[in-house]
């Protein structure tokens, strides 16, 4: 399905990022709550009417907008193929696979970090050339990081409950997302090192930026204004900073 010529198509990630993105999008006039009935609603495609009376930072989306609700990891695929003009994706997802996309705005939502962790009681000191098994959902980012230390680990791919890896002896260490640190604490793991500080980014299909320049630049400007005025998420921001002030995107 091609993107709508008269409006923008947005690919939004279902789950925890969506919760934080909704208030931000509403502030710029993209109000999914007007048509979406919440997490029990199983529909995946929504056509939003233009807002009846646009607010001060609202967009003039005269053609309305179409929203696709997709798995977070699939958002870049919809945007890269041009099915969606824009999307919202975590820096972890974007860093795991190189894509031909513009990334004009850090939305500051979905803050967490990609980190190495291991059993607090069974630390594995890292040294060049050592044998190491690492369980992770992020093989590429993980390999790049360990290789920079002269280590070529065996990657054990897992898709959830990654913290079980070193507890069960499946792996020596894990590389996974940490937000509050509660999952690590409750499983007697300690954080060894941060690989990447993660927030969600606005991503744009390169051709859409040319063909739909006006609505896309308006969307970027409206989101930038809303972030500058109220900060990310406002009502749905993470409680704990996942990234120390002044640090760069990668550790
Ligand atoms: N504590 C966290 N754990 C995981 N992802 C987080 C966390 N905080 C923010 N994020 C961001 O949210 C994205 C994942 O969102 P979510 O967990 O809803 O999707 P998912 O991994 O597909 O979910 P599920 O575990 O239900 O399959 C990550 O890519 C990351 O950018
Ligand atoms: O530091 P915390 O605040 O505890 O958050 C981090 C945890 O949250 C995520 O898991 P998720 O809830 O997505 O479940 P999963 O194990 O199925 O990926 C992530 O993979 C960690 O396990």
Image (tube, helix red, strand yellow):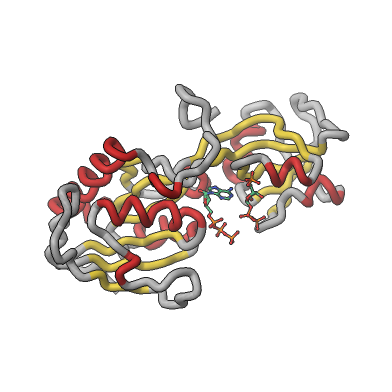
Q: Is residue 130 above or below residue 37?
A: above
Q: Is residue 154 left or right of 178 when viewed as pictured?
A: right
The number of discs equals 0
Residue at 21% over, 69% down: 4
Evaluate whether residue 94 shows in this view.
no
| Image coordinates for residue 218, horizontal then vertical, percent | 17, 49
| Image coordinates for residue 77, horizontal then vertical, percent | 41, 60
Q: Residue furthest top?
A: 246
Q: Is residue 80 above or below residue 145?
A: below
Image quarter where the C terminus lies is top right
Specify the quadrant of the image occupied by residue 34.
Answer: bottom left
Image quarter where the N terminus lies is bottom left
| Image coordinates for residue 223, horizontal then vertical, percent | 27, 45
Residue at 39% over, 60% down: 12
Residue at 15% over, 48% down: 56
Evaluate whether residue 148 shows in this view.
yes
| Image coordinates for residue 37, horizontal then vertical, percent | 40, 73
Specify the quadrant of the image occupied by residue 46.
Answer: bottom left
Observer-nearest of 50 and 142: 50
Specify the quadrant of the image occupied by residue 113.
Answer: top right
Q: Is residue 84 above or below residue 241?
A: below
Q: Is residue 237 left or right of 222 when viewed as pictured?
A: right
Residue at 59% over, 33% down: 195
Q: Is residue 147 left or right of 2 when viewed as pictured?
A: right
Q: Residue furthest front?
A: 235
């Amino acid at each position: 399905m091609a993107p709508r010529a008269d409006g923008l198509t947005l690919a939004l990630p279902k789950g925890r990022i969506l919760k934080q993105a909704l208030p931000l999008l509403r502030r710029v006039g993209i109000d999914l709550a007007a048509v979406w009935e919440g997490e029990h609603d199983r529909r995946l495609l929504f056509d939003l009417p233009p807002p009846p009376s646009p607010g001060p930072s609202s967009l003039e989306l005269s053609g309305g907008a179409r929203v696709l609700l997709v798995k977070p990891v699939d958002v870049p695929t919809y945007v890269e193929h041009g099915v969606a003009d824009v999307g919202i994706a975590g820096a972890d997802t974007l860093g795991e696979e190189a894509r031909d996309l513009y990334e004009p705005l850090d939305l500051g939502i979905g803050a967490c970090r990609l980190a190495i962790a291991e059993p607090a009681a069974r630390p594995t000191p890292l040294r060049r050339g050592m044998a190491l098994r690492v369980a992770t959902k992020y093989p590429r980012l993980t390999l790049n990081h360990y290789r920079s230390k002269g280590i070529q680990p065996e990657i054990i791919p897992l898709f959830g409950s990654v913290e079980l890896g070193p507890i069960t002896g499946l792996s020596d260490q894990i590389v996974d997302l940490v937000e509050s640190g509660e999952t690590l604490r409750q499983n007697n793991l300690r954080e060894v090192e941060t690989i990447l500080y993660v927030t969600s980014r606005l991503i744009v299909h390169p051709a859409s930026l040319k063909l739909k320049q006006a609505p896309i630049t308006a969307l970027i400007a409206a989101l930038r204004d809303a972030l500058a005025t109220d900060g990310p998420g406002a009502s749905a921001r993470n409680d704990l900073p996942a990234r120390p002030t002044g640090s760069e995107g990668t550790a």
